[in-house]
Image: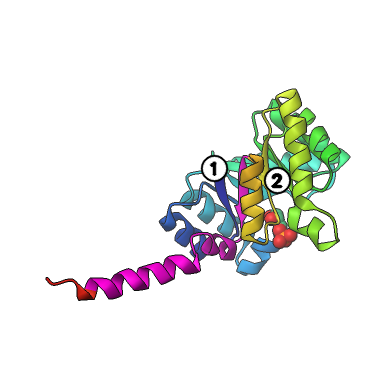
Amino acid sequence: MDFFLDTALVDEIRAGLEMGMVDGITTNPSLVAKTGKKFMDVVKEILDLVPGPVSIEAVSEKAEDMIAEARDISGLGENAVVKIPMTEEGLKAVRALGEEGISTNVTLVFSPLQALMAAKAGASYVSPFVGRLDDVGEDGMSLVSQILEIFDNYMFETEVIVASVRTPTHVLTAARLGADIVTLPYGVLKKLPKHPLTDVGIAKFLADWEKVPK
Ligand code: G3P
């Protein structure tokens, strides 16, 4: 299972890479806005820093504009993946970009049928937003389960990125379901190695070590 970081903050990316737990990055316009930096500066910095795939979102709404934007984004680095919103225009763009060999991540996926269409269009990745579904009283992880079942039925190569992750439980459930990738806010990544009993155990072992004659 790959872990991506869902951030555009370079300090978080560096820290995640040092932990050895970051296989790629996902960004979106909201995350880029949080950096306060120019779009191109942020994107180039991240693409240079990260060896794995980096998803960068196209903001056009018409397929032909998305395609032009995607070509520009893709030209910035071999690891660039273009995020395309799940719309009819987006599906047209995904198919055309796939034929050009440009990797795409279909974003804002909230239903299994949206994911099926994205896979049929040839998307490299789909991003179901689990946290935002949970926020409105739906079950985000049930969506992931249905997408994995569909992709397995038809042996689609499209990879599932579990996105809009809010808690370690989302990560655990994604792993148990066999999702290809989770994209994590840095705060969630930091929680994953922790367990209170580990801290208690370390404190006890260190205290006992003091009693060992040396
Ligand atoms: O990057 C896409 C997704 O992970 C956004 O998450 O927390 O804004 O719903 P969130």
**In the image, residue 195 lies in the stretch drawn in magenta:** yes
Q: Residue at 39% across / 67% down in the picture?
A: 201
Q: Which mark is residue 83?
A: 2
- Residue 127 located left or right of residue 41: right
Type of residue at label 1? Gly
Instruction: Please tell me whether mark 2 sits on a helix, a strand or a loop.
Output: strand
For marks 2 and 1, give the one nearer the viewer: 2
Give the residue pinned by disc 1. 77
From what the image shows, is residue 63 above or below residue 185? above
Residue extent of the magenta highlight: 180-209
Residue closer to the observer: 98 or 175: 175
Could you tell me if residue 28 is visible in this image? no
Q: Where, quadrant-wise, is the C terminus in this rendering? A: bottom left
Answer few, some or many: residues within 10 Å of disc 1's Cα (few below 14, many 20 plus, some between 14 and 19): some
Residue 45: x and y, percent? 51, 56
The quarter of the picture showing ligand 1: bottom right
Residue 61: x and y, percent? 84, 47
- Residue 171 located left or right of residue 19: right
